[in-house]
Image (cartoon, rainbow, N blue to C red):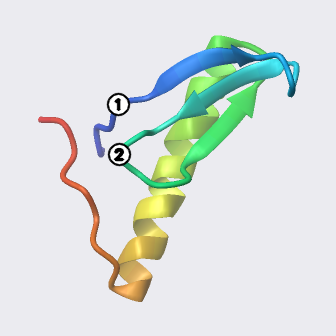
Amino acid sequence: MNKYEVIIYWGEEDLAFVAEAPELSGCAAHGDNQPAALASAQEAIRLWVETAQEFGDPIPACIA
């Protein structure tokens, strides 16, 4: 499992909790509550890394 920082906050514009992985450009997700936002972010991180690998793009080192 990759370990990236995830920041979760309430998004007033979206009326949902937003979860962002700052080390992965553009990687964000949302959910109705904090656990749902985190679960969505973990899936988004997995897809982000898979896509980067597929295209040979650099992948930032994850937190140890």
Q: Which mark is residue 23?
A: 2
Q: Is 15 above or below relative to 6?
A: above
Write down the residue under mark 1.
5
Q: What secondary structure is found at the residue carrying circle 2? A: loop
Q: Secondary structure at mark 1?
A: loop
Q: Residue furthest left?
A: 64
| Image location (x, y in percent) of residue 5 | 35, 30
**Mark 2 or mark 1: whose residue is earlier in sequence:** 1
Q: Amino acid type of disc 1?
A: Glu
- Which image quarter: residue 60? bottom left
What is the spatial separation of the Cα atoms under label 2 and label 1, in whole angstroms?
Answer: 7 Å
The answer to the question of whether label 2 and label 1 lie on touching residues, with beta carbons closer than 8 A, is: yes
Q: Residue at the spot x=42%, y=86% of the render?
A: 55
Left or right placement of residue 44 versus residue 24 in this view = right
Above or below, comparing residue 19 to residue 42 in the picture: above
Reply above or below: 9 against 6. above
Q: Residue at x 22, y 45 (%)?
A: 62
